Amino acid sequence: MLSGTHRFPRQDLVTYGRPAIEALRELAASWHTRRLMIVTTASLEKGPAAQLAAELGELCAGVFAGVSAHSPREGVIAGAEAARRADADLLVAFGGGSAIDATKVMQLCLWAGLTKVEDLDPYRAGRGPERVRVADIPAGVRMVAVPTTLSAAEFTPFAGVTDAARKAKEGYAHPLLAPRAVILDPAVTLATPAQLWSSTGLKAVDHAVEQLCNPQRAPFADALAEDGLRRLARGLAGTKADPADLDARLECQFGMWLAMSGVGSGRGMGPSHAIGHTLGGTYGIPHGVTSCVILPAVLRWSEGFARERQALVSDLMGAHGTPASEAVKRLVVALGLPADLKSVGIGPESFQAIAEHTLHDAGVRTGARPINGPDDIVEILRLAAG
């Protein structure tokens, strides 16, 4: 008999298919927000973020654009300080996964009074006995997310932040880190570079595939992942054919939402995400790109241990009879994305170090084929080498 627990993020609502400014004004009014601060990246600061700030008028108390790729701790601390100076009563994350994850942890900094980079040490996941019981910290200022990519960070109560000194991605979690509301407006994604849109779409595909190929079944989560993968395959093809197709973009947003929602089953992600965490946090490879080069290799390496599940993946992607590894790789190539490690500057000389670092990631323990040591990860990397 199956048994398990599905945890839902503590979010008030998700609104979709409406202009972000319209939805944000309504939320601010209903929550009696007086001073909101937009959190974004330098690439969006002078364009879409500036436009959003102008449309909000006096409601916007400032724009913090100090978030960079992989959400370094320094940007998180600086953003929390900017929110204090602005006396912000609501944070609005505008951007992709880096902006959203950074804003999540900015909330934690505000709640716990963290003002220095080293203050974050006892709050990160996986610490020893000195770790703070983060879930016991009372929440204060919350956030809204307006995503411009398909990373799906806005649908989880945990965040990844990079410790630049250790060159490592570290996790933070609290039941209320998830944005209080999410606004899915496909129009705000039109300015997102095509490669960023498509590669984060592959990250969303990775979310669905690793849920579906997990050896533990969770019917509710599986159903979400199935429909999510189907919509992603259809939507990504549509946005490639016509980047201005808002219906196709919204289909992608629905797909990534469904695919990520399956993680509430608690099964965790698998080896593709584990290796991706190392490639991202230590080698600076964008998270979406890590899925492009690693997911097909993981599927190929584990094919004999999950034939039925991988056949389902192929069917959902409209590639009946094709190995799942090949179906995913064909999508990567069709979208014009990097398809191997060589394309992103990672050579065999780095494989052993990547494998040994990845072995500490929980994702290596949840794949269809057991990973028994660094040699197994090196084997996957060789398949991804190109």
Image (cartoon, rainbow, N blue to C red):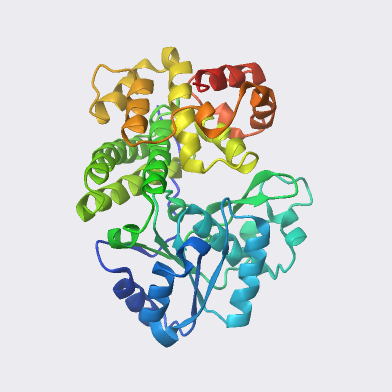
The answer to whether one can see residue 152 in this image is yes
How many callouts does the rendering have? 0
Establish if 18 lies above or below 216: below
Q: Position of residue 323 (x, y in %)?
A: 33, 18
Residue 126: which quarter of the image?
top right
Q: Nearer the viewer, residue 362 or 102?
A: 102
Residue 364: which quarter of the image?
top right
Q: Position of residue 202 (x, y in %)?
A: 39, 38
Q: Position of residue 336 (x, y in %)?
A: 36, 36
Q: Nearer the viewer, residue 267 or 164?
A: 164
> Which residue is the extreme one toward the bottom?
58
Q: Position of residue 313 (x, y in %)?
A: 32, 27
Establish if 360 lies above or below 284: above
Taking the image as shown, residue 323 lies to the left or right of residue 238, namely: right
Q: Residue at x 58, y 81 (%)?
A: 86
> Which residue is the extreme one toward the top?
304
**Quarter occupied by the N terminus:** top left
Establish if 58 lies above or below 288: below
The answer to whether one can see residue 267 in this image is no
Establish if 263 lies above or below 334: below
Taking the image as shown, residue 74 lies to the left or right of residue 263, namely: right
